[in-house]
Amino acid sequence: MKKFTTLVAIDFSKSCYAVLAKALDFTQKMNGELHVVHVVESSFFSKKIDLDSIKERGFNELIKNFSVIKKENYHCVSGKIKVEIANTAKILNADVIIMGNSGETHFLNDLLMGSHTKEIIKYAQTPVLVMKIDHEIEYQNILVLTDLSEESASAIKKIAEFFPNSNINLINLFYLPLDNRINTYGFDEEDVKEYKESVEKQSRKNIDAFLKSLALPKNIKITASAINSSLNPKLFEEEVADIGHDLLAIHATQNVSFFAFDILENSAVDVFVLK
């Protein structure tokens, strides 16, 4: 049977060590195996890179605080960050990539904070857990955005496998275009009310049917809601404020939407992205 495999992307900043410590604890609880990857972007350096030397120094630095990590589980590679992290995860058949939201040293701060984080998520086929705050990788309440597709159903089942003791709350967002056009189109208040109730009822019906179709084990604690949304990422936190959560899970297609990325950027809690 395949061992659960975690891949942690590091940049040797203080924050990445905090993430690594939490990832190590999480992996041990899963009876799994942890691997570490560090990518050296050769384009940043004018002189020729001695990758073997960098790898040796990096590993020696790593085991000062993490002596449990085996040398063969430390991967130091040269190339594009998004490509090499994704490739390493694929080679290892990793179950999850865990990374921090930012680094702390010089250009590495920019490296893992904005576009690179997004690029890794876009490029990797492996689920990515982005840790935004320093805490144990244990979640009481997971909020899952779903589009009610078969792919989303597969992602939800994977979330339930990763976190079987968490409360999972599915939400499906629906949009009501109730703006100034309503008057122009000749609808009165009663028409608008009837339309709104109809959409809300159908949305509720759809997600209830979807929840039933998942056929998850009885020990999985899961609920579902349909929420009227503006589809404005900056307002998303406000729209789901009544649903307490310490992890936001997003199912994304290969072409990850700007909406999903903006939610990731604005989220105050950790984000788990699955494809």
Image: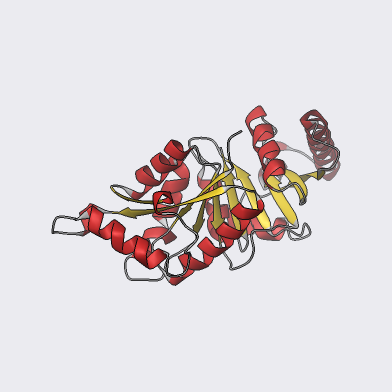
Q: Is 97 placed above or below 56 here?
A: above
Question: Which of 29/158 is in front?
Answer: 29
Number of numbered labels in the structure image: 0
Residue 216, percent from left and from top = 79, 35
Q: Is 237 placed above or below 176 here?
A: below
Would residue 206 appear left or right of 271 to someone viewing this image?
right
Q: Residue at x 77, y 50 (%)?
A: 165
Q: Residue at x 36, y 43 (%)?
A: 83
Residue 11, percent from left and from top = 39, 62
User: Residue 239 is drawn in which quadrant?
Assistant: bottom right
Q: Is 132 placed above or below 162 here?
A: below
Residue 79, percent from left and from top = 28, 47
Q: Residue at x 64, y 37 (%)?
A: 155
Residue 177 appears in view: no
Q: Which residue is the extreme one toward the left?
A: 47
Question: Which of 90/3 is in front?
Answer: 3
Would residue 87 appear left or right of 20 to someone viewing this image?
left
Residue 110 appears in view: yes
Residue 263, percent from left and from top = 58, 53
> Where the N terminus falls, by quadrant?
top right
- Structure colour scheme: secondary structure
> Where the C terminus falls, by quadrant?
top right
Question: Which of 96/228 is in front?
Answer: 96
User: Residue 156 is drawn in which quadrant?
Assistant: top right
